[in-house]
Image (spheres, rainbow, N blue to C red):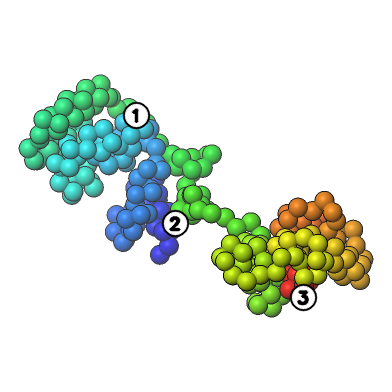
């Protein structure tokens, strides 16, 4: 089961504890569990569906954030089952602490005592909110996105890999877009033999951007190619800075139903250059 679906199961257990399947145990990956634990914000009502030791219910924090040494002295079976309602009844949470505490642990215990002693329950149901959705409701899509926070996106991936062009042409465009082709500038960086000027125009340094859209011969090639299909208006001109930007803007100017064909034409044209 995918991690996002594992999170969906945890959400269902949290928000619908009365369902017959809610008590079933399924393997949950530690990364999925960790994301779920930091993504749920709970507003305690009657405390029956909120775990005292692990949920984030006290000032949007879990007790592990406030008193980690105290929580470490509580048995895992208690951490997984003790609800807020049970813990506050007759100070049951105090009796859950089974190991001795150090000086730091005692300080954490006193802080926790002050916070918990002033907390009172109500007759309303606990409210659990998924922080990654504007409505506070879990969706697998929002969970899936969280696993890729901080990742580097590659904007033209769809235009490259979702066309009808041959794989070798797609691979070339992928390398060209990332400026990884063996043009003179990249050869120079690595101390390898290279030409001083573009082999086509003999006017400017050879870079992948110059070869694809900057060279006068390249622009003439694109103009004649697009003219064959009545699309000469989208051919690159002197104002184009990079191939990727030109391709992005060109794709947006073409009707949606024609984009896949135009993208294939651009890939094949760049490959032939």
State the CA–CA distance, disc 3 to disc 1: 62 Å
Q: Is residue 124 visible?
A: yes
Q: Quadrant of residue 109?
A: top left
Q: Position of residue 146 (x, y in %)?
A: 47, 50
**Which residue lies under the disc numbered 1?**
59
Looking at the rendered image, the quarter that the N terminus falls into is bottom left
Mark 3, mark 1: which one is toward the viewer?
Answer: 3
Q: Position of residue 149 (x, y in %)?
A: 48, 49
Q: Quadrant of residue 260?
A: bottom right
What residue is drawn where x is 90% and y is 58%? 233
State the CA–CA distance, disc 3 to disc 2: 43 Å
Tell which of 104 and 189 is nearer to you.
189
**Which residue lies under the disc numbered 3?**
272
Residue 175's place in the image compared with 246, above or below, is below
User: Which comes before the other along the chain, label 3 or label 2?
Assistant: 2
Mark 3, mark 2: which one is toward the viewer?
Answer: 3
Report crowding for label 2: few under 14, some 14 to 19, many 20 or more residues within 10 A (C-alpha): many
Q: Position of residue 160 (x, y in %)?
A: 67, 67
Q: Could you tell me if the residues under marks 3 and 1 are in contact, i.e. CB atoms within 8 Å? A: no
Q: Position of residue 87 (x, y in %)?
A: 20, 35
Which mark identifies residue 4?
2
Is residue 70 found left or right of 182 in the rendered image? left
What residue is drawn where x is 41% and y is 59%? 3
State the CA–CA distance, disc 2 to disc 1: 27 Å
Tell which of 211 and 115 is nearer to you.
211
Tell which of 91 and 245 is nearer to you.
245
User: Which comes before the other along the chain, label 3 or label 1?
Assistant: 1
Q: Secondary structure at mark 1?
A: loop
Report crowding for label 3: few under 14, some 14 to 19, many 20 or more residues within 10 A (C-alpha): few
Q: Secondary structure at mark 2?
A: helix
Q: Could you tell me if the residues under marks 3 and 2 are in contact, i.e. CB atoms within 8 Å? A: no
Is residue 176 found left or right of 149 in the rendered image? right
């Amino acid at each position: 089961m995918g991690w996002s679906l594992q999170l969906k199961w945890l959400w269902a257990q949290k928000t619908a504890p009365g369902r017959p399947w809610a008590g079933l145990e399924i393997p949950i990956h530690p990364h999925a569990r960790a994301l779920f634990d930091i993504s749920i914000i709970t507003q305690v009502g009657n405390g029956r569906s909120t775990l005292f030791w692990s949920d984030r219910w006290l000032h949007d924090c879990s007790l592990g954030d406030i008193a980690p040494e105290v929580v470490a002295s509580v048995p895992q079976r208690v951490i997984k089952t003790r609800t807020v309602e049970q813990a506050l009844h007759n100070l049951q949470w105090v009796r859950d602490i089974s190991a001795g505490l150090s000086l730091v642990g005692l300080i954490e215990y006193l802080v926790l005592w002050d916070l918990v002693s002033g907390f009172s329950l109500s007759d309303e149901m606990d409210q659990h909110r998924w922080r990654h959705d504007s409505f506070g409701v879990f969706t697998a899509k929002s969970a899936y996105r969280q696993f890729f926070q901080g990742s580097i996106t590659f904007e033209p991936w769809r235009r490259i890999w979702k066309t009808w062009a041959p794989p070798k042409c797609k691979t070339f465009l992928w390398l060209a877009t990332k400026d990884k082709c063996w043009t003179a500038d990249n050869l120079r960086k690595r101390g390898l033999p290279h030409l001083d000027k573009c082999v086509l125009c003999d006017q400017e340094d050879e870079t992948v951007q110059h070869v694809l859209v900057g060279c006068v011969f390249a622009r003439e090639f694109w103009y004649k190619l697009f003219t064959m299909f009545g699309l000469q208006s989208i051919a690159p001109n002197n104002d184009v800075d990079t191939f990727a930007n030109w391709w992005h803007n060109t794709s947006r100017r073409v009707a949606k139903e024609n984009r896949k064909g135009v993208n294939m034409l651009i890939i094949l044209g760049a490959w032939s250059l």
